[in-house]
Amino acid sequence: MCEYLNQKNKLAQEAHEAIRPTRLQPDIKETATLSSRHVKLYQLIYKKAVATQMSSAKGLSFSLEVTSKEGYRFESRVEIITFPGYLTLYGVSNQETHYARLEKGQEVALKELLSEEDMTKPPPRYGEASLIKTLEDAV
């Protein structure tokens, strides 16, 4: 016989039960009655649930350092996926790149050099009114 111990932990989140699909193959007739937003939500939940049961992705990390004759140094980091694992659900597959064919000390020719600066701005935080409006628009 098992004894249930009711011990509350102050740090525990005690979250609700996860939302998960109940069937691996959804019934086409049932999804026909759903709106496109509901279908997208179901696909998101479905992919996340299936991904948790799949293998992790594996890959190789490379660091590429190029120094010009004038002494300028450029650096690039690349990750090449060798086994996509759960990423196959999201359309990612094994990658073949030209970086894999480079040797240490090999000279390379510069074709193009682009310099970009990009500043992103996060969306504004919800206030009481904006949260209510967003929830009403979602229904």
Image: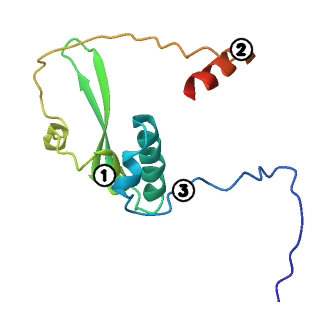
Q: Quadrant of residue 123?
A: top right
What residue sits right under mark 2 in the picture?
A: 129
Res 86 seen here: yes
Q: Amino acid at mark 2?
A: Ala
Q: Against 4, is 57 above or below?
A: above
Residue 127 vs residue 69, the one in the foreground: 127
> Which residue ends up furthest to the bottom in the rendered image?
1
- Could you give the CA–CA distance between mark 2 and mark 3, rounded to whole angstroms? 31 Å
Q: Against 30, is 70 above or below?
A: above
Q: Secondary structure at mark 3?
A: loop
Callout 2 touching callout 1 (CB < 8 Å): no
At 38% across and 10% down in the image, what residue appears?
117
Q: Is residue 26 left or right of residue 124?
A: left
At 50% across and 62% down in the image, what residue appears?
22
x and y percent of residue 75 in the render? 31, 26
Tell me the mark number nearer the camera, choosing from 1 and 3: 3
Q: Earlier in the sequence, mark 2 or mark 3?
A: 3
What residue sits right under mark 1 in the picture?
A: 88
- Could you give the CA–CA distance between mark 2 and mark 1, rounded to whole angstroms? 40 Å
Q: Earlier in the sequence, mark 1 or mark 3?
A: 3
Q: Residues within 10 Å of mark 2 (few under 14, many from 20)?
A: few
x and y percent of residue 16 in the render? 71, 52
What residue sits right under mark 3 in the picture?
A: 20
Q: Earlier in the sequence, mark 2 or mark 1?
A: 1
